[in-house]
Amino acid sequence: MTDLFGWFLKNFDEITGTIIALAYLYFSIKQNIWLWPLGIISSAIFAYVFFRSKIYAGMGLQIYYVIISIYGWYNWWKVRNGNKLSTTVKSLLGNYKLMVVLLLIVIFLFVVLFQILVHTDTNVPYYDALISALSIVATWMLAKKYIEHWWVWLLADPISIGIFIYQKLYFMVILYFIYSIMAIVGYKSWKKDLAV
């Protein structure tokens, strides 16, 4: 029993962050503005977890999530003040120029992050940089309510699972497995509200 209690205390931050992140995911699927403050809290907790685990780009990504969550919270808050453009789910499929720009941003971020990470003591620089680049763009897309952000998560989340298994962050494995499944649910839910 004491071993279980000790394990719980040792992993308390990861467990707490996971529970809050699941609430964040629920509100994200429901397009509820409360996803943003929950995102701020869970991201701050995970920044510490990733720092402790030497997943440095992931840590930086969590700091970015705090900042983009403030932006997303503001952007979605404008909805309550009559900004109809922000209330609807949008699609990138017809906007090829923006799609290309976002792809170029992912590539640029990947290269920059990888070059930084290879000079640290992380043992997963390639995957850490790739996940971070994809996640930065996906979260910006969420803040702008582009439905395709769910597709980007379907690419990034399974890669994250592999890193977390390797780093023995088992609550993160569970969380990102749920994220992967719920990205499909979220996409289907948002598709119903897609602006035509």
Image (cartoon, rainbow, N blue to C red):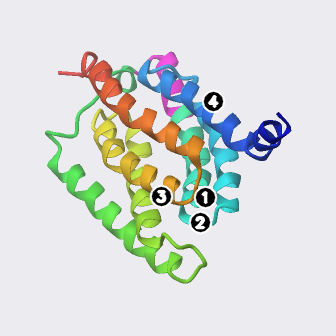
First of labels 4, 1 by sequence position: 4
**Numbered disc 4: secondary structure:** helix
Please state which amino acid type lies under the numbered disc 4: Ile
Please state which amino acid type lies under the numbered disc 3: Ile
**Numbered disc 2: secondary structure:** helix
- Residue marked by disc 4: 19
- Residue marked by disc 3: 163
Question: Residue at point 80% right, 41% down?
Answer: 3
First of labels 3, 1 by sequence position: 1
Q: Is residue 59 above or below residue 176?
A: below
- Residue marked by disc 1: 59
First of labels 2, 3 by sequence position: 2
Residue 87 appears in which quarter of the rendering? top left
Q: Are marks 4 and 2 in contact (CB under 8 Å)?
A: no
First of labels 4, 2 by sequence position: 4
Circle 4 or circle 3, nearest the eye:
3
Please state which amino acid type lies under the numbered disc 2: Tyr
Range shown magenta: 74-83
- Whole-percent x and y of residue 83? 42, 22
| Disc 2: CA contacts within 10 A as few (<14), some (14-19) or many (>=20) | many
Image side of residue 147 versus residue 125, left or right: left
Between 114 and 80, the residue placed more toward the observer is 114
Circle 4 or circle 1, nearest the eye:
4
Extreme residue in the right direction = 2
Whether residue 121 appears in this view of the structure is: yes
